[in-house]
Amino acid sequence: MARDAVATVAAIKGLLAAETHAVLAGWDLSRGKSENLRDSPALRACGSERLAVQRAKALSSRLEIPGRDAPLVALARRGWPPEHWKPPLLWHLAEGDRLIRWFLEEWLFPRRGAEPLNARDLRPAIVALRGAPPLGADTVEHVAGALFKIAVDADLMTGSVSRRFRPFRLSDPALLYMLHALAERHAAARRIIEAPDWRRFLMTPAEVEHELFRLHQFRVLDYQVAGSLAQLTLPRASLADFAEGWEPWTGTGAKD
C-alpha cells in the first residue's frame, strides 16, 4: 500500500504480534515470501485451514520481505521476547499503513494523559480523515475499536471499552532498534530525536533525549551535546547489522 493511502484492512486485522513472531521465527531466508507463508508451520498450527489462509493473506499484504520489514525476520529468528519485539513490529506496521500511523502519531499522542478514551471519541476523526474511503457507521465503529485494540495489544493502553494509558517505556533493545532505524533516515542527531516516529510510542523529544543520556552513561552508545549541536554514535553501522548481530542490553550494564 502506498505510504499516503488510507485503508482499513490492516487496522481491522490488528497487530498480530504473536502470529507474526511465530511465522517470522521459522522464516527460510532462501525462499520467497509466498513460499514461506504457504509452508509456515506456525500457520498450519492455527487450527483450521480457513484461519491459516486468512492470516497468511494478512501477513502477505503487510510484510515487505525482502525489503522494509526484513529486519523483523532477524529479530524473530533470534527469539526476541514480546517486550522487545512488539515496538519494532508496531513501527513497521505503521510505516506501511497511513491509518495506523495517523492514529498513533496525530490522534493518540496528543491525548496521552486524557482518559478514559473510547470509540466514540475517535469516530468523528476517522470520518473526517482526508483520503479515507467513505465508511458506514458500523465500519467506523469497527475501525475505531480496532485501532484502540492495537494500542492495547502494543501495551500502550489498557481496557476493552474505556481505554486508559498505561505506564509504558521502550525496552533498551527496542529503543536501540528504533535509533538504528531512524539513523538510516536522518543523518543529524537532532532530527533523529525529533522524528515523529517516537509518537508511536507516546514519547516526546525530551524523553528520547533522556534515554540517550542514560544509555550514554552505561556506554551502550555515545551521545555528545554542545549547545545546539548534538552528535550520536550508535553501536552498529546499520539497522540490518544491529538486528542480525547485536546482543541486546538491559540498560544496567549487563547483557540480556
Image: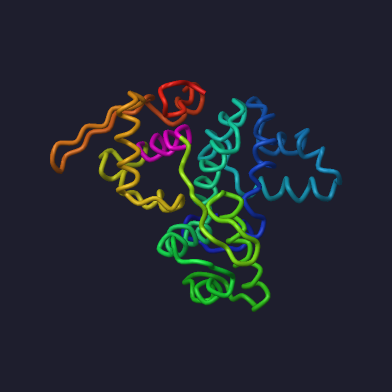
Picture layout, residue 125 above or below residue 171: below
29 relative position to 249: left or right = right
176 relative position to 155: left or right = left
Magenta-drawn stretch contains 245: no
Which residue is nearer to you in this view: 186 or 76? Answer: 76
Q: Quadrant of residue 182?
A: top left
Q: Residue 192 location in percent, x, y?
A: 32, 43
Q: Residue furthest right?
A: 48
Residue at horizontal 69 percent and vertical 42 percent from the top: 19
Count of all numbered marks drawn on residues in the image: 0
36 relative position to 168: left or right = right
Residue at horizontal 78 percent and vertical 47 percent from the top: 53
Q: Residue 128 location in percent, x, y?
A: 49, 76
Q: Residue 214 location in percent, x, y?
A: 33, 33
Q: Quadrant of residue 233?
A: top left
Picture layout, residue 79 above or below residue 149: above
Which residue is nearer to you in this view: 86 or 249? Answer: 249
Magenta stretch in the rendered image: 172-183
Q: Main secondary structure of the magenta part?
A: helix
Picture layout, residue 137 above or below residue 157: below
Q: Residue 159 location in percent, x, y?
A: 62, 60
